[in-house]
Image: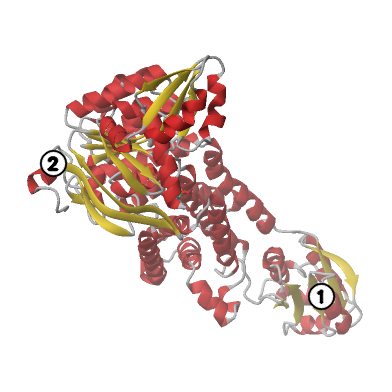
Amino acid sequence: MSATLPSTASADLVIDVQNLNKSFGDKRVVKDFSIQVPRGRITGFLGPNGSGKTTTLRMLCGLLTPDSGTGTCLGFDIVKQSDEIKLRVGYMTQKFSLYEDLSIEENLMFMARVHGLDRRQERVKEALERLGLYERRKQLAGKLSGGWKQRMALAASTLHEPQLLLLDEPTAGVDPKARRTFWDEIHALSAEGLTVLVSTHYMDEAERCHDIAYIAYGELIARGTAEDILKTVGLVTWEGEGPGVDRLSSEIGTLPGVETAAPFGTTLHVSGTDERALDAALAPYRRPPFKWERTAPTLEDAFIHLMGKSEDNFR
Amino acid sequence: MTAVSKPKSFWATRILAVLAKEFVQLTRDRLTYAMILMIPVVQLLLFGYAINNEPRHLPTAVLVQDDSTFARSTLAALVNTQFFDITHEATSVGELDELLRKGEVQFALTIPGDFTRRVARGDKPQILLEADATDPSATGAAVSAASALPQYALTRDLVGGMAQRAPKPPPFEVVVHRRYNPENITSYNIVPGLLGIILSMTLVMMTALSVTRETERGTMESLLATPAQPIEVMIGKLAPYVMVGLMQTAVILVMAALLFQVPMEGGWIALGLGVLLFITGSLALGFLISTLARTQLQAMQMSFFYMLPSILLSGFMFPFRGMPEWAQALGTAIPVTHFLRVVRGALLKGEGLSTLWPSHAALGVFVCLVTAAAMMRYRRTLD
Ligand SMILES: Nc1ncnc2c1ncn2[C@@H]1O[C@H](COP(=O)(O)OP(=O)(O)OP(=O)(O)O)[C@@H](O)[C@H]1O
Ligand SMILES: [Mg+2]
């Protein structure tokens, strides 16, 4: 148990882990990872590809054993009490991992039985209807399109009314409308007290989370609400407008003081943490036809900045 | 807390979950389904007929040292059985031996010089039938036909003063020397033996794929994230295949009775128990293999690796007692060996549990050891 937290608070921590480490071979994939997630919060888990998100989620639900580190999930020890954890956690894998040669209904029934649920027929029917799968219930899972597979996997991982949901890129390949429905669903569940840790690469989804945890190269490097993260990163961002400004991104991007220069439609976002260096870099471009304006940095700017920084640390 | 609070208390439902899933998957997989039924039928027909079909008109060499009516009648009767074709007339024992050794003939028949004289005297001369028994099933039927010759071969010749001898004990004897394979396995032995081979071939292989398939398809991640315990997964996965094994057994036994007229002397309880133990053992072994193999291909290879000694060292192919001691020791460790003893003992000799129990015990030990090993090897995490 973390010493910095009062015991009353830790009672309501759904996830509370300290210094988790995991290596595959001699590659250290997760490094001294500690995180606390309070009950009822939706926490977005972000980070570049290969940063260790999936590995961390697997350690949390007992699918991987950490090399070192301790912690609890729903009050149960993540190493010794994984059976208890599995009963109460819904885990949706990044890669589709239900049975492709079973129908949607059969897959859900399997999950209902394996969790020892009562009223199985009813529950399965409810879940099918809630996620709009009822008409397709007899279809083989393998024949579904990507988005439908994701919906079915979500239904399967929430069927046993878990207290914690671990979702690994649940909306990859899902259309915008379905994603909206999906997130409405997540928020509704969280209003009832469900805690959610969800990994994603989508910025709009990150913004819909209560909290964000940002991981890079196996290390947790930013934690808090979206505003917290923007504040701690402390980026200054200029937005440039004018014909052809978006084509200057590579030119501006290499200037000293500029950390990112990214075209957004016909505009260009230029960010850096050192306000003066940034001004100096942009000075030659402050002329017609270009118009420059201070703008609020987006989460994406912040994450690209974090990514670049941790890369430097890593080398 | 909700209704789900004790991980151990729902074991029956969890087994049912895995069992129902496996069963549906099995029926979805048409090819496997077809294989389950076709393998016993095809194998039994192929093996059974190839081995069991009593070959006729086998090449035979004769050495007749007594040119007489009796000798000619005996040879005629021999040819009339249709099992023998006289292809060579040897002039010396050495020549006869060589023909047999080179495999030019399957049989060598020697009629001694004093044949007629001794028949007349009534002191039962012997004629020698040497058989190349390397392939025992090829010679079995022919040998028994030859052994019956003395009963009737000379009835027409023994007229007049000698006629009164006819109904009496046969006037001569056929002495059979089986060369190269003294413990003569008859075709009856082969078909029950095939039960063991077919069951292990299909059952070990099918379950050997069961866990590796989940790993390869990625469904292992979901399965491991559920509260199902290893032993529950194992029971749930194997149970549908017990049914498969029993179905195959029924098919094989019915075919053995109808097509091959294998005698079924009883010993049904011993047989039933043996079949159950053997099926469970084979399935558990398959499960163990699937926890060891990383890919389905590896699982297949390991199953084949197990099949070779099962066929060669179990007493199916070669008589168990004829094998060198080290091979016997190896054979004793293979469940097929014990299963064959049960099946042959129960089916052919009608023996019961009272005599066959050591084989049952050996099968039981195998089931326990392999299950324990499989449970130890079953990975509960993705590490
Ligand atoms: N079973 C494994 N064996 C060996 N290496 C692994 C294994 N699983 C993951 N890794 C490695 O660990 C690192 C982190 O992988 P992980 O899947 O946790 O990343 P991620 O953050 O989920 O990435 P993505 O956003 O692409 O899903 C990667 O470099 C990956 O190659
Ligand atoms: Mg991942």
Residue B214 shows in the view? yes
Callouts 1 and 2 on one subunit: no
Q: What x and y, as percent, mark residue B251?
A: 51, 46
Residue A5 or residue B93, whichever sits in front: A5
Which residue has dot 1 on it? Answer: B100
Quarter of the figure that contains the C terminus of chain B? bottom left
Q: What x and y, as percent, mark residue B287?
A: 43, 55
Q: Is residue B330 above or below residue B42?
A: below
Residue B173 or residue B378, whichever sits in front: B378
Task: Specify whether B263 is left or right of B174.
Answer: left
Cα separation, mark 1 vs mark 2, equals 91 Å
Residue B147 or residue B7, whichever sits in front: B7
Residue B110 or residue A142, whichever sits in front: A142
Mark 1 neighbour class, 10 Å CA radius: few under 14, some 14 to 19, many 20 or more: many
Chain under disc 1:
B
Task: Specify whether A27 is left or right of B305.
Answer: left
Q: Residue furthest left?
A: A8
- Residue name at image x 67 percent, y 58 percent: B51
Given the image, on which type of amino acid does mark 2 rest?
Asp
Residue A189: quarter of image:
top left
Mark seen at residue A12: 2
Quarter of the figure that contains the N terminus of chain B? top left
Chain under disc 2:
A
Task: Specify whether B355 is left or right of A123.
Answer: right
Q: Disc 2 on helix, strand or loop?
A: loop
Mark seen at residue B335: none
- Residue name at image x 85 percent, y 74 percent: B62
Given the image, on which type of amino acid does mark 1 rest?
Leu
Q: Disc 1 on helix, strand or loop?
A: helix
Task: Specify whether B50 is left or right of A92.
Answer: right
- Residue name at image x 36 percent, y 25 percent: A204
